[in-house]
Image (spheres, rainbow, N blue to C red):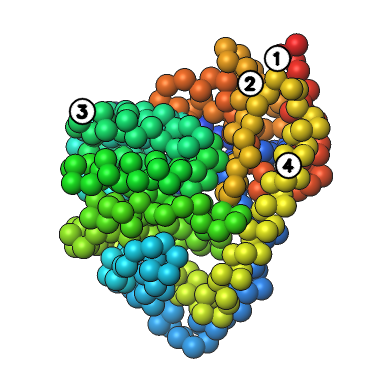
Amino acid sequence: MMAHRFSKLSSGTMDSFIMGLVEVAARPGMISFATGLPDNSLFDVDGLAKASCDVLRDMGGGALQYDTAAGYIPLRERIAARCSKELGFKASWEDVILTNGSQECFDLIARMFLEPGDRMAVENPGYLGAIQSFSAYGPEFTGIDMGPEGADAGQLREAISGGAKLFYSIPNHQNPSGNSYSDAVRRDVAAAVEGSGCLLIEDDAYGELGYRGRAGKTMKSMAPEDTVLTGSFSKTISPGMRIGWMVVPEWMRAQAGKSLEAMSLQSGSFCQKVVDRFLQEHDYDAYLWELRKAYLAKKEFFLDAMEDCLPDSMEWNDPQGGMFVWLKSPEGTEAMRIFDAALERKLVVMPGKPFHVRGGGNTLRLNFATPSEDQIREGMKALGAACRVILG
Ligand SMILES: Cc1ncc(COP(=O)(O)O)c(C=O)c1O
């Protein structure tokens, strides 16, 4: 048979580690703190069933038709209005491009801006799924250390001086660390990118899941011409419906629409109509407060279980939103060994190292949103035992 050769760029795409763990976590009897899935029981199944029926009844076949490349205009108007009301900047519906989950924005931005070998800055640790998507375009990554107050703006300035064209950041309840940027870091990062030629990608995937409201101002409101803000209904309404978006500066609109059309014609407009109808039929803010309350309660239950079960030498943070706790074993120890020991006890956790460009061997990411209280209780005992095996 003729040999078929994958392109250099496709075979150079990084492995994510995540999908492999989703499969392991799905095996019978496994408990998972590993993936980033929302809690099934918090999806509004009845509300979405009603919205779907209402759309089909009122729009008929039009509900099932192709739409414009950038998506269903009423939903884009709704997202633009929320930018003004909650995110601190004015956007027109034409600035809002609907995508197949916010994951598609990363591919779209990379295909618009990156040539192989271009420099790009990413948080260290940073969100692996997005970094995997960028990696398909062959950039050289520069890691910007991410601490409890956010990304190191000094390192970012250096990276920009060294030619970084993009900086990918998650200022709210970051995946993986759960940390958010302080106000000062937001200001510094916005000032660093403004007019610099480096485009900021501000990933707001968890911005609406701050337990006491939004964690801080958007950097898009501070450097609007140099920032693309990406958002998603995946963590609030449904990840399976795959509705994400990006809010682009006016100068990027036409190129973004053209690139999206070339890639997929458009993302799924039936689901866009259903979510638009759902938002018409519900008070979204009241809905979000219920969700935030439920995730806050889960986080507190999870942290109490950590306190009860984990050895004193383990350290973790107390995230103020989102779905993740960041766990550290003592400096110099290998958290991968905790991963292995936990797996033997039928618990899947996510090692932190794959989220890093450098370092991170002693870190683990734990998701408290997906497991039930019984699973948290049982899983945490397994995690405590796994830590003790390693720490002695
Ligand atoms: C930080 C972050 N950004 C983006 C995404 C992609 O989400 P989606 O494509 O479902 O919008 C995820 C998914 O877990 C995420 O954690």
Q: Pinpoint residue 366: horizontal percent, then vertical percent.
A: 63, 36
Distance CA(mark 3)–CA(mark 2): 34 Å
Q: What is the quadrant of residue 352 in the picture?
A: top right
Distance CA(mark 2)–CA(mark 4): 18 Å
Left of 240 or right of it: where is 348?
A: right
Q: Is residue 95 visible?
A: yes
Distance CA(mark 2)–CA(mark 1): 9 Å
Identify which amino acid the numbered label 4 is placed on: Phe
**Up/down of 330 relative to 365, above or below:** above
Task: Determine contact: label 2, label 1, CB under 8 Å.
Answer: yes
Residue designated by label 2:
329
Q: Which of these two is toward me, 219 or 1?
A: 219
Left of 262 or right of it: where is 266?
A: right
Residue designated by label 3:
162
Q: Secondary structure at mark 3?
A: loop
Residue designated by label 4:
302
Identify which amino acid the numbered label 1 is placed on: Ile
Q: Residue at x 57, y 25 (%)?
A: 363
Discs 2/1, front: 2
